[in-house]
Image (cartoon, grey):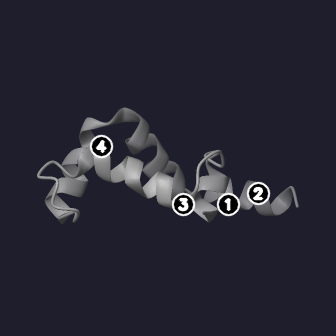
Amino acid sequence: QAIQAINGHTNMSAEEFTNMIFQKIDVNNDGELTLEEFISGVERDEDLMELITKSFDLSNVLKVIQSG
């Protein structure tokens, strides 16, 4: 939920967000993500790549902390 809030995805629940990610990158639909599926899925999906990049970029966290 914190990652969603930092990146502006607060319009869906954490469960909905997780389901969206799985729908995009769980290619064999087994309900589990292998490291290979995750990497391949993130590389193929520009929006997901941006989200993951922002999630690991602490400058967004610092901006949120600084703004209160």
| Numbered disc in front, either 2 or 4 | 4
Q: Earlier in the sequence, mark 3 or mark 4?
A: 3
**Any mark on residue 64, and which?**
2
Could you say where residue 30 lies in the image, as x and y percent from the top left? 15, 61
**Disc 3 to disc 1, how far (Cα)?**
19 Å
Pointers 1 and 4 in contact (C-beta within 8 Å)? no
* Residue hosting label 4: 24
Pointers 3 and 4 in contact (C-beta within 8 Å)? no
Q: Does residue 2 appear to the left or right of 29 in the view shown?
A: right
Could you say where residue 19 lies in the image, as x and y percent from the top left? 39, 53
Q: Is residue 16 visible?
A: yes
| Numbered disc in front, either 1 or 4 | 4
Could you say where residue 11 lies in the image, as x and y percent from the top left? 65, 45
* Residue hosting label 3: 14
Q: Earlier in the sequence, mark 1 or mark 4?
A: 4
Quarter that holds the C terminus: bottom right
Which residue lies at the image location 75% right of the left edge and 54% below the top edge? 63
**Disc 3 to disc 4, how far (Cα)?**
16 Å
Q: Earlier in the sequence, mark 3 or mark 2?
A: 3
Type of amino acid under label 1: Val
Which residue lies at the image location 32% right of the left edge and 36% below the top edge? 45
Type of amino acid under label 3: Ala
Type of amino acid under label 4: Lys
Q: Is residue 56 visible?
A: no
Pointers 2 and 1 in contact (C-beta within 8 Å)? yes
